[in-house]
Amino acid sequence: MNALSRGSIVKGRSLRFENATTFHGYQLHYPLKEVKSCSYSVTVSKTGDYAHASFRIKADLILIDAVDGALFEQPLDLTEDCDLLEEMDEEGEGYLVAGSVIDLDDLALRIILSSFPIKASRPEGKLPSGGFGYRVLSEQEKAKEKESSTSSPFDKLKDL
């Protein structure tokens, strides 16, 4: 845990921290399966009523593909500026960090989790063509099937 006391953040003075971590001991959330490596630098300052953090994060992540559940590697390189809120305000902008100690590792992980879509997928990932009781058709295949179909949905009732 890379911790910072909220009391050490004062107006007019910036604090800079750097850390390398794999977030061992932290709870990872879907679609994040594993953090192979992560390094970040953060500058924390106080402007007005809020503490402000500027993160630069570089990481190699293992994500779960939302389409087929396969694991894939995803590099990450991002810059994020955020306010560190003690309580939710009307605007809801920033990250809620309650208490007198700010866990910078936890905050970096929250930024990582918010940086990719909920349904992450590989660029080369493909949708399944079908399964038990369903199949996936393109619009063209569906239109072609509809044209060639001569049966009525009521034809099945004749056999009853």
Image (spheres, rainbow, N blue to C red):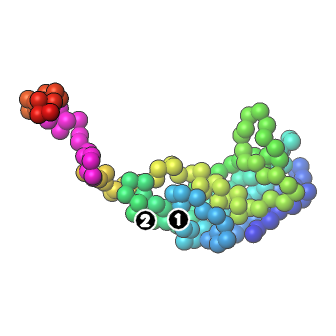
Res 66 seen here: yes
Query: Against 133, is 105 above or below?
Result: below
Callout 1: SS: strand
Rendering coords of residue 56 (x, y %): 64, 58
Q: Residue at x 69, y 48 (%)?
A: 81
| Span shown in magenta | 130-145
* 10 Å crowding of disc 2: few (<14), some (14-19), many (20+): some
Depth check: give the residue in front, 50 or 137.
137
Query: Against 81, is 8 above or below?
Result: below
The label shown at residue 19 is none
Res 144 seen here: no
Residue 83 is one of the magenta-drawn residues: no
Depth check: give the residue in front, 63 or 39.
63
Residue 132 is one of the magenta-drawn residues: yes
According to the picture, the residue beneath numbered tag 2 turns out to be 71
Q: Is residue 70 left or right of residue 77?
A: left
Mark 1: amino acid = Lys
Residue at mark 1 to residue at mark 2: CA–CA distance: 8 Å
Tell me, yes or no, whether the two marked residues, 1 and 2, touch with CB atoms within 8 Å.
yes
Q: Is residue 152 left or right of residue 84?
A: left
Rendering coords of residue 74 (x, y %): 47, 62
Q: Residue at x 54, y 71 (%)?
A: 36
Q: Is residue 65 left or right of residue 126?
A: right
First in sequence, mark 1 or 2: give its number. 1
According to the picture, the residue beneath numbered tag 1 turns out to be 33
Q: Residue at x 57, y 71 (%)?
A: 37
Mark 2: amino acid = Leu
**In the rendered view of the protein, which quadrant contains the C terminus?**
top left
Rendering coords of residue 38 (x, y %): 60, 68
Determine the residue located farthest toward the front in the rendered image: 160
